[in-house]
Amino acid sequence: MSFDLSQFKRDLVYADQASVAEIRSSINDIREFDRETESFLKFLKTVMSVAGLCTVFSLCAFFPLAVLPGSVLVVCAVIYFQKKKLDLPNRRYEFTTEVVNALNRDMPKDGQIKFKMDLTPSNGTHKKTVSEKVRGWDVTYFEDPWLRLEGRFADGTAYDISMIDRFQSRTKWARSSSGKSKRKSKTKSATVASVKIFPKQKKYTNLGLVMGQTNQFLKLPTWVKIKKVNAEPDVLAVTTITSENWSVRRTDPNTKFDGPEIVYTSLLSLYQVLNASKSENL
Amino acid sequence: MATTKPDDGMCHETSGFLFSHPCDRFSVQQCRQCQKPICEDHGHDTPEGVVCTTCLKKQKQAQRQTSRDDQTTTPSDYGHTTYGNDPYFYRDHYYPGYGHTVVPANAGSTPPPIPVTPTPDMISGTDFDDAVDDKRQSHDPADFTEGDAESLQREEDADFESDMGAS
């Protein structure tokens, strides 16, 4: 199934089973589309600023003159807010590119990845899980599974990687000491990464002997917390969570929190268990 | 050192991200150091020319050894570099000794007590949230963003009540 950019522009979700080359090419199209959107939004912002200034000056000088720049301002604002919905979260597709490239190093040449990347905002209505009132705050919880990658490495081990953003939004009306009412709002988010591998039992016959030691092989970044580890003969899995505002080091070299590092280290840790099961010391 | 394998048009490098394996891609260049035919992914640009992953790893290892001997290296020298971000080098940077595991003597028997984190109950697949809940109790009530990823699960979190700083 080839990538359909016009379809993607409608729903902002890319789901496919494709080779790494095809996925890279599709993400390049998405990146290009996002760059165009970002530069158009930047242009609209400039036009709105100029139109806004002109409107203010016209209002001071001669009121009817303000009609033209005022109209431009309104039209641009409407287009801006419509287009803003298409401004994609860069870190998601950059993260995916990095992880897919890394997976490709150990995949067979004709290997394919079952792939779903959701670039719609985390606070979309369909991602809402629960709304409740917590001590005066209206709290809404969102769960956004934005990436799922499934495939197989050259050694026959299958993998299943998923990324979920958890988002929480709280609002409340508060009255200050001067009697003014003000709407307060807060948000917080965290990213949950789940990495599972399904090793071929014939290839790793001694896995059962080292499974109990899985925790000793986990070496993950200090800025993630381990949420769950699952070690069974047919599946090794680690789930982590981070509330740090991670980025992708290739596009943001100064970041302390390189998102793909979570997946790299999780995979390396789980594979270290497999390596141990093949050790001669057993 | 010249390669001994015949040139069959394939890449002769075996380095991988997670494990070593024969590369099934076509060679498009030669390593400047060992003359091995290599694919695009296994070739790395260096000031001396394109070298294969294995040669570059050896080069980097030697450099690190020299730096350690000179006692001039700071911890950041072992952090991420241009090559460190490449998946082929990631395991060497992040996971020294990767793939050459010394299995604990009691492997296959009862797991030993685990030092700090992760906790023993993780191995059976128990959700780690229980352990995190204890930490939650000691949270600064005014703290909104720091280390409270786990509180994104639904809980009676009263932190917001007293914190009206942001809007």
Image (cartoon, rainbow, N blue to C red):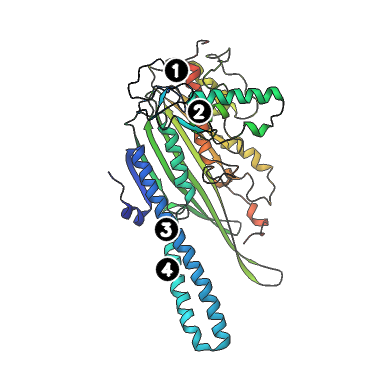
Query: Are there few (<14), some (14-19), or many (20+) residues within 10 Å of tag 4?
Result: few
Residue ID for mark 1:
B2
Q: x, y (%) of residue A238?
A: 50, 32
Disc nearer the start of the sequence (4/2): 4
Residue ID for mark 2:
A268
Q: Chain of mark 2?
A: A
Under circle 1, the secondary element is loop
Q: x, y (%) of residue A144?
A: 45, 48
Under circle 2, the secondary element is helix
Q: CA distance from mark 1 to mark 3?
A: 49 Å
Q: Observer-nearest residue: A91 or A179?
A: A91
Residue ID for mark 4:
A79
Tag 4 and tag 3, C-beta contact below 8 Å = no
Disc nearer the start of the sequence (2/3): 3
Disc nearer the start of the sequence (4/3): 3
Q: x, y (%) of residue A26?
A: 36, 46
Q: Observer-nearest residue: A170 or A253?
A: A253
Q: Chain of mark 3?
A: A
Locate the N terminus of chain A and report the quarter of the image it occupies.
top left
Image mark count:
4
Q: Chain of mark 1?
A: B
Residue at image point 66% right, 72% down: A180
Query: Are there few (<14), some (14-19), or many (20+) residues within 10 Å of tag 1?
Result: few
Above or below for B99 versus A147: above
Check disc 3 and give the amino acid type.
Glu
Tag 2 and tag 1, C-beta contact below 8 Å = no
Residue ID for mark 3:
A36
Under circle 4, the secondary element is helix
Q: Chain of mark 4?
A: A
Q: Residue furthest left?
A: A1
